[in-house]
Image (cartoon, rainbow, N blue to C red):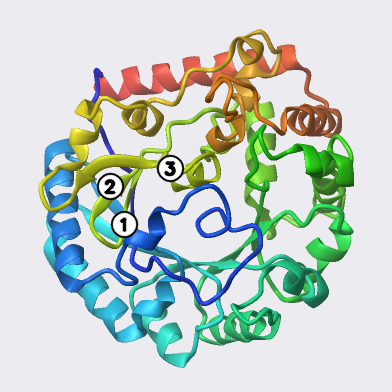
Amino acid sequence: MGSLPVLSQFILKVASRCNLNCSYCYVYNMADSTWRQRPPLMSDRIFGLALERIRSHCRFTGQEYANIVFHGGEPCLIGAHTFDDWCTKAKAELTGLAKPTFSIQTNGTLIDQAWAEVFHKHRVQVGISMDGPQPIHDAFRIDHAGRGSYDQVERGIRILQDADVRYGILSVIPLGADPLVVHRHFMELGCKEITYVLPHVTYDTIEPIHRLYGETPVADFLIPVFDDWWFNATPDIHIGDLRNMARIVMGGSSQIETIGNVAPQYVFIESDGELEGLDNLRACRDGIAKINLNVRDAEFRDILQANNMHGTAIFEGMPLSKTCQACPECDTCGGGYLPHRYSSANGFDNPSVWCADLLKLFAHIRLRLGVTIEETRALRLALHEASIDSMKAQVA
C-alpha cells in the first residue's frame, strides 16, 4: 500500500447486548453468533486500551481528526455518566495530536435528559434508528417481550430536539410499506437528516423477499421518496443515500461506503477489545467479521498484515465481480454494499443482491437530473482535472 492506512472512524462496540430484539438485526438474528462470547459491556480497561491504540494510530498516520463512534448492541446501556467520562478522557488523551469528534448510533429508547446534556456537552452527532410511523416501526423494532418501541423512540427524539442536539434518522427500508407515509412521517417529526438503509440480505436469503415484494422493492420504495424530495424543493432535508447517488451521477465521488465501492476506512473494536472489519458482514456467515487481533496487543495497522480480506476491504475497497466491471454504471454503483454481494457459492464475487434495484434507481435519478452515463464520465474527468490543477497551484 503506497499511502498510510488512515482510519476516518474508530467504532467502539461498547455494548454487545441490546434492550431491543429487532427482527432484521444482523448482529443477533442472522448468521453470526460471536456476540454470545463477549462481555455485555466494554470495561474501562478495554476503552483505555482502545484509546491508546487510537492515539498511536493518529501519531503514525499524522491524521488531524479521529471520529470515535459509540455503537452496539445498544450503546446507551453503558450509562450517561460512563459516556461522559470516556468522551472527556478521549479529549484529554488526543489533545494536541488529533481532534476527536463523537458520534453514537442508538435505538433511542434510553435517551433522557441526562443523555441529552452529555450529548450537548460533547457535541455528539446522534443517529436514531427508526423505521416510520408507529404501526410500521413496531412491526420490526420490538423489545424482548415483543412490545413495540415507537413511543420511547419518539420521546427520545423530542428530548434531543428540546436540547438542541444534532441528530439524524437511520431507517431500514420497510419493504412493502407506503414510502411517502414513512418519509413524510419523519418530516412531520421535524427530522432534517434521514438515511434509508437497504435491508441486509445476501444471495442465500433474498428469494423470500422477492416472492413477497417483487423484483425491485428497494427501488420501488426509494423512487417516490426521491421525487418527493426533488420536486418539493426541500434543501434543508438531507437524505444521505439519495443525495450521495445524485452527487455521483453529477460526477462527484461517493461519500458513503454503501455506494461506489469506497474504502470505508474504519475499524470496529468489540466489547472485549477484538478488532473486526465491517460488522454488517455478520449477515453473511458466522465469524466472518473476525480479524483475530485485539487492542490488548495489536495496533490498527496490523490489520494490513493479518492475511485476510479485511485489510483490503477497510483500506482499499474489495475487487468488483466481472459482471460489475462490464456494467455501464460500474463507477457509480461500485457493486453496491459489500455484505449484499455475498453468496455461499461465490463469496463476494457477485454484484449486489440489490443490483436490479440500484440500476432502476440510478436510471430514475439520471432522468430527473437529465444526465447521461457519458455526461457523468465527462463531469468526473473535469472534476478530477480541476482537483489536480488545484493541488498543483497549492504546491506552487
User: Residue 216, relative to residue 161: is it above or below?
Assistant: above
Q: Residue at x 34, y 30 (%)?
A: 315
Q: Amino acid at mark 2?
A: Leu
CB under 8 Å between callouts 1 and 2? yes
Circle 1: element type:
loop
Could you give the CA–CA distance between mark 1 and mark 2, rounded to whole angstroms?
A: 6 Å
- Number of other residues with Cα within 10 Å of mark 2, as a class: few under 14, some 14 to 19, many 20 or more: many
The x and y percentages for residue 75 are 41, 71
Label 2: element kind: strand
Q: Is residue 208 above or below residue 333?
A: below
Quadrant containing the N terminus is: top left
Distance from the alpha carbon under mark 3 to that under mark 2? 10 Å
Horizontal placement of 285 versus 83: left or right?
right
Q: Secondary structure at mark 3?
A: loop
- Label located before the other in sequence (3 or 1): 1
What amino acid type should be assigned to the residue bearing mark 1? Glu
5 on left or right of 378: left
Residue of label 1: 270
Q: How many C-alpha atoms fall within 10 Å of the one at disc 3: few (<14), some, or many (≥20)? A: some
> Disc 3 vs disc 2: Cβ atoms closer than 8 Å?
no
Q: Position of residue 44 (x, y in %)?
A: 18, 72
Of residues 367 and 172, the one nearer the viewer is: 172
The amino acid marked with disc number 3 is: Leu
Q: Quadrant of residue 137?
A: bottom right
In the depicted view, which residue is nearer to us: 180 or 62?
A: 180
| Residue 95 at least partly seen | no
Q: Circle 3 sits on which residue?
A: 278
Mark with earlier residue (1, 2): 1
- In the drawing, what numbered circle is on residue 275? 2
